[in-house]
Image (cartoon, helix red, strand yellow):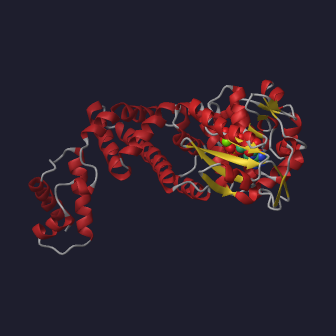
Amino acid sequence: DQEMALHSREVIHTLTAAGHETYWVGGCVRDELLGRAIHDMDLTTSAEPEQVIALFPHVIPTGIQHGTVTVMQGGHAFEVTTFRTESGYADHRRPTEVAFVKDIRQDLMRRDFTMNAIAMDKYGARVDPFGGEADLRAALVRCVGRAEERFEEDGLRMLRCIRFASVFRFRVAFNTWKGMIRRREGLRFIAMERVRVELEKMLSGPDPLRGLEMLRRSGLLACTKVPVPWEQCERDALSGIVELPDELRWGLLLLSCRLTSETADELLRAWTFSNAVRLRLVHLLEWEAELVSCAVVIAVDSASHKDDEFHDEALRRSWIRLLIKLGRDTALDWLELYKTLPPSFRGLSSGADMHVARMAELANSWTKQAAVIRIKDLNITGNVLVQAMNRPGGPWLGQTLEQLLLAAACGDIPNETEALLQEAKRVTKRVI
Ligand code: ATP
Ligand code: MG
């Protein structure tokens, strides 16, 4: 973003004019050299936080103890961090001590990978003491310093390593890989939230299967706090993963491990997904499982019915039941998933497979036709029913409403109060 670059240049200019050495550093320099889009620009400076604060009118003290302040310039936020060293790392994640230093090289030394340890000044000149540019050209992820020590300090770096290798389609330098394997147990100390964020970035990238393969080969997944059972995922099921939007990629992955929706639910909770994402994925798995069992049942019934219309009607009713239970959004998600999932994955009889395919084919028109799929869409309320039937509320009421909903959703009766009342009288007679 040109404008962001311009404003970050102004920040650098203000600091250097006041006599403080200042650079772009880390991800933005790396992404610039790779010709990739830059999403945020971090700066590093010899100025101490108070000096930075004194130079700019709009500053947020993000993490002064660690030397980081956020400078607002032209509507953009820039993290400006004082050159510093780190030590301690008692918890395998965060340094216990940071010290401000005057030499950019010392600051670069604390960074994880050579490609993330390049600083660039406002003339475009680079400070690159560890050969980061050469590694970028060679498409290599390499630790700054001794890999084993760096991974021991902070276990999250191992997942960052695989994430970068996956997203950039890089290889991992031999010693870095070896160090990672030796220190993989250290992943146990990393909060699942951090683990999830790295896996999300990896999975959203252009080649998630590359990352998954590296995770499998390194044995890292067995070392996370909450195990990630991707070891058992079926590669064939994942071949279309890049065609899916980010969140659904997780759905395909869970499915490819043949997890039940209950197990998936527990895992997604433990991996600290938001409720919204968790429910979205759990519903997707439920949809798949229930749709498959409907297709199987209908295929078994097929023996006695050779009539296609009969099948279509049974399939339509199954679909509408699912719509009522899990909602339209899940229907759309499942259709996207369906397009990428090879039919062989389900291992169904050819009859059942055909039914699944038929549902996918007709789903859009069925979904459009079903105008009523929630109880509150019905043109009748529980109160009206209680009065019309002259009967106190009780379990019958919910059951009746559900039956009305199914009948209206399937188009058996119109969604009109009179018709619904009549139907209610008919079905409750049966219930009594
Ligand atoms: P992206 O933002 O694209 O995910 P990034 O490299 O910019 O990648 P950030 O988390 O924004 O990642 O970190 C900015 C910089 O801070 C990195 O480029 C690296 O120099 C340094 N850094 C980040 N995390 C670590 C870490 N765990 N250990 C050492 N240095 C790190
Ligand atoms: Mg960044």
Q: How many marks?
A: 0
Residue displayed at 89% across by 38% down = 175
Which residue sits furthest front? 18
Up/down of 304 relative to 148, above or below: above
Task: Where is residue 342? Give x, y as percent.
Answer: 53, 31
Residue at 43% from the left image edge and 42% from the top image edge? 296
Residue 395 place in picture, x, y as percent: 27, 70
Based on the displayed image, in which of its 4 quarters is residue 396 positioned? bottom left
- Against 6, is 111 above or below? below
Residue 120 is left or right of residue 247, and the answer is right
Q: Quadrant of the N terminus?
A: top right
Left or right of 326 on screen, residue 150 = right
240 sits to left or right of 139: left
Of residue 364 and residue 47, the one placed in the foreground of this image is 47
Picture quadrant where residue 7 is located: top right
Q: Does the image show residue 391?
A: yes
- The C terminus lies in quadrant: bottom left
Q: Is residue 307 visible?
A: no
Q: Residue at x 8, y 55 (%)?
A: 418
**Quarter of the rendered structure image containing ligand 2:** top right
Q: Is residue 193 left or right of residue 316?
A: right
Q: Residue at x 57, y 58 (%)?
A: 269
Observer-nearest residue: 383 or 131?
Answer: 131
Q: Position of residue 276 (x, y in %)?
A: 47, 53
**Residue 91, percent across and down?**
80, 61
